[in-house]
Amino acid sequence: MISNLGKLGLNLRTTLIAVSWIPVALTFNENVCYVAKIEGKSMRPTLNPSDKTHTDWVLMWKWGAKNPANLRHNDVVLFKSPSDPQRVYCKRIKGVQYDTIQTRHPYPRAIVTIPRSHIWTEGDNAFHSTDSNEFGPVSTGLVLGKAVAIVWPPSRWNSSLNQSVGRGDLSIKGSAI
Amino acid sequence: MKGTVGLWLRTGSLALRSFCLVHVINSHFYEFTETRGESMLPTLAAINDYVHASKKYRNGKDCQIGDCIVAVKPTDPYQRVCKRITGMPGDYILIDPSAKEGDDIDGQAFNSYIRVPMGHVWVTGDNLSQSLDSRTYNSLPMGLIKGKIIAANDFNKPIWHDGALFGFRSIENSYSDEF
C-alpha cells in the first residue's frame, strides 16, 4: 500500500515536471524555430515542385525575422496574410524598405516605392500566386519567419531555396525614375 | 563542487520555465503593461498609465468598431501602439475629419474617402491632434493586433480614491450610432 502511494507520487511528480516544460517548448516554437508545411503551388518550382509526389516541410527561423535589417532580397518568408490574419503565405522577398519596384497586373500602379519596414513579396510561380501585386507591400510585423531549408521529405534535403527566384530583379535604380 | 553545479542547473531550469510560462501567458491570455504618449488622451494618461490587455482578441478576432486595441506599429515591428478602431473591413472612411476644404499634403487630399480592405481595420487615437495613426500609415492589417484593452490603472492617482485602486477603470467601447 505504502509503496503504491510512493509510486503514484513519483508518477505525479514526473508528469508535473513534464508539464512545466510545455511553455518552454511553445516559446521556442513561437520565437526561435518551427517546422512548417507548405501548401499550394505558388512557390513552384522551388517548393512543392509537383502535384503528385509529396508536400514539402520547411525549417522556419523566427528569431529576429521581423527586423527589416534581417530581411534581404530573394529570402523565402512565411507571413500572415494582410487580408486574412488566419492564413499564412509563403513567398519570396522581391523588395525591401525604400526600394522602388516594378509591379505587375493586378497592382493598380506600374511602379511602387516600399514604405519603411515593409517588404514586397511574390511567389516564384507568378501565374498561380496571390502576392503583393494583390495586397501591396507587407509590414514586417506580419512576418512569422524565414524558410531556411527543406527538412522533409529526405529526397529534397539537397534542394536549394534559391534555384529559381521568380521574376528576377525588379528594382528600379535611382536614376531611372 | 558537484553540488554547486547542480544547484546552478536547477535554478537555471526553474528560471527558464518560469520565464517561458510568463511569456506564454503574456502573448496568449493576458498582459499588464505600461503605455506612453499623448495619442490616447483623455482615455489613457500620457505617462504612468498601465493597461490590462486581453489576448483573446489577437489577430483582430471578435474586435468591433469602438474597441481599444494594442497593435504592432506597421512601420516599426518593435514598437507597439494603442489606438481605437474607427473603421471595420468594407467601411468607407473619411481620411481626416479635421482636414479643411482644399488641404493638400504631398498631393493627397485628406478630405477624401477610402474603403478599408478585407482583413484590415482603420485605427485612430482619441487625441486626433497628437496621434500618428491610420491617417498616416493607412489601414492596419488585423494580423498586427495583439490584444484588446479592457481596463487600465493610473498610477498618477493615489492608492485608494473614489472607490478605485490606483485609478482603476474599465475601458469601454465608445462607439455610438447616431442614426
Image (cartoon, coloured by chain):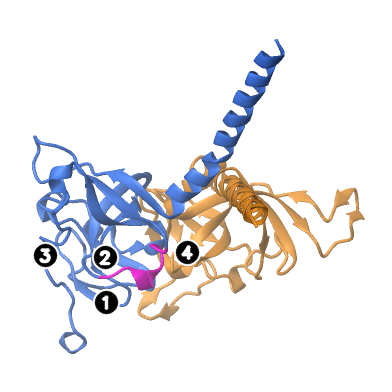
Chain colours: A blue, B orange
Label 3: which secondary element:
loop
Q: Residue furthest front?
A: B1
Residue B87 in view of the camera: yes
Q: Residue at x 16, y 72 (%)?
A: A170
Label 2: which secondary element:
strand
User: Is tag 3's residue or tag 1's residue first in the polypeptide sequence?
Assistant: 1
Q: Is residue B123 left or right of residue A122?
A: right
Q: Is residue B4 left or right of residue A35?
A: right
- Magenta span covers which residues? A64-72
* Foreground residue among B7 and B135: B7
Label 4 is placed on what type of residue?
Ser
Quadrant for the C terminus of chain A, please.
Answer: bottom left
Mark-to-mark CA distance, 4 and 1 = 22 Å
- Looking at the picture, how far across and down is residue A95, in whole percent? 25, 70
Q: Residue at x 18, y 39 (%)?
A: A55
Label 4: which secondary element:
helix
Give the number of the disc on residue B85: none
Q: Marks 2 and 4: which is nearer the front?
A: 2
Q: Looking at the rendering, which quadrant does residue B128 occupy? A: bottom right
Mark-to-mark CA distance, 2 and 3 = 12 Å
Residue that label 2 marks = A120
Residue that label 3 marks = A167
Label 2 is placed on what type of residue?
Trp
Whether tag 2 and tag 3 are in contact, CB under 8 A, the answer is no
Residue that label 1 marks = A99
